Image (cartoon, rainbow, N blue to C red):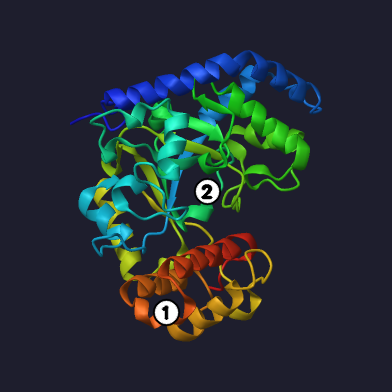
Amino acid sequence: MSDPAAPPLLTPAQTIALRHVRDVALRDRPAALAAIARHLAGSGTAYRTDEVMAAVAAHGRLTLNFHPDRLLRDGRTVAEALDREGIYRSQFETGISNGGLTAFPGGDRDRWEEMLFGGAYQRPGVLPAERPKYGGLNLLDHADGACPRFGSCHLRLRPATLARTTFSFGDSHTQPTDFGTLEIFEPVLAALLAATAGTGASLGVAGMDTDSLLRALLRRGERESGAVGRALDDYIEAQIHGDVSLAHDVEALVVDPSFRGTEVGGILAGIARRHGFPLRWHAGFALPVDGIDAEFRGPAIPPLAARVHAEFARPGEPVDAALIGRAAASVVREPDRWADRGPVEVTLQHLKQLWHVLVRFGTPPAR
């Protein structure tokens, strides 16, 4: 039997991409070390840089957030594809995204990757399956994963995957300037400490100053269990190079409670059983239909929530991940039903934004 923690063989393009980011981080490392020293000195703690770096390696976990009930181009749900194929695919293969739909040659995602990875994935003969898979670095073990804006559920990856991952402080679509690898993480750490010192709002730690962030990170095995981060716009993006195999790379599957007792929930439970990792439930996000904020993602969202609830909610059901998913499936399968709202792409984008409102303001549903 093969070692489940053994890294996959990387293609030449993947190896070049990793090396490129490492070289960029190595170039920026001296300035980052100086910045980290300044932040630590001003934090009111006696922590050393090597302690913080060791804590990142020991406690950081990669999470891949996803909506399990969204439809792929072939009509299958994401959960069904994971179940049948046993691997997690990138937008270049699936054709769907919970961000922007720009993963094609010449698209925004393609151009970002060309910049991030030194053109490694634009070389002749590179296949879509070779492209990196996007997630986040969950430093404080938040129950909703590192990037809940991209999905209600997440795969928590084994520590071994960190070695073939590159990082940026901030989402790649924002054209970040701070990059790293696990080995040379200082530029990303320096950016994190600077952002936290400035606003206390990064990575789902609103109100947490640098001192509190460092203490939380260095509590080792004593962090609060079950806390959500609600990280919508600020996170350490992770780009995993090489295949993400459910059998070899996944440590746990964490699911939104709105999928309990559903077909999708049953598929996810079967995936966990088959591959031998635990299925866990986070607390979830839900709101009453009349409690949808009209400013956070714009005035189009409350009336959309009211329509979704009126047409798809079960008795007593709040607005939650599963309800939004049923509406999203209808938009794809029954576009004429939604024609009065304009192009399908606009309605799907508004449904994404409705999910963002839940992450920002939602509370655990009543049991």
Q: Is residue 66 visible?
A: yes
- Point out which mark residue 248 bears: none
Indicate left or right for 1 with 164 as reference: left
Please identify the quadrant where the N terminus is shown. Answer: top left
Q: Which residue is mark 2?
A: 147
Among numbered discs 2 and 1, the one appearing first in the sequence: 2
**Vertical side of 134 occupied by 332: above or below:** below
The residue depicted at 36 percent of the width and 48 percent of the height is 91
For disc 1, the neighbor class at 10 Å (few under 14, some 14 to 19, many from 20) is: some
**Vertical side of 365 occupied by 25: above or below:** above
Percent across and percent down for residue 211 are: 76, 33
**Vertical side of 205 occupied by 239: above or below:** above
Kindly state the secondary structure of the residue where label 2 is placed: loop
The residue depicted at 59 percent of the width and 41 percent of the height is 140
Percent across and percent down for residue 272 are: 31, 52
The residue depicted at 64 percent of the width and 68 percent of the height is 298
Q: Which residue is mark 1?
A: 338
Q: What is the residue that sits farthest to the front in this orientation?
A: 106
Indicate left or right for 209 with 113 as reference: right
Percent across and percent down for residue 282 are: 50, 57
The residue depicted at 31 percent of the width and 33 percent of the height is 242
The amino acid sitting under disc 2 is: Cys
Quadrant of the rendered image containing residue 249 = top left
The amino acid sitting under disc 1 is: Trp
Q: Is residue 277 visible?
A: no
For disc 2, the neighbor class at 10 Å (few under 14, some 14 to 19, many from 20) is: many
- For the residue pair 294 and 44, the one nearer the viewer reads as 294
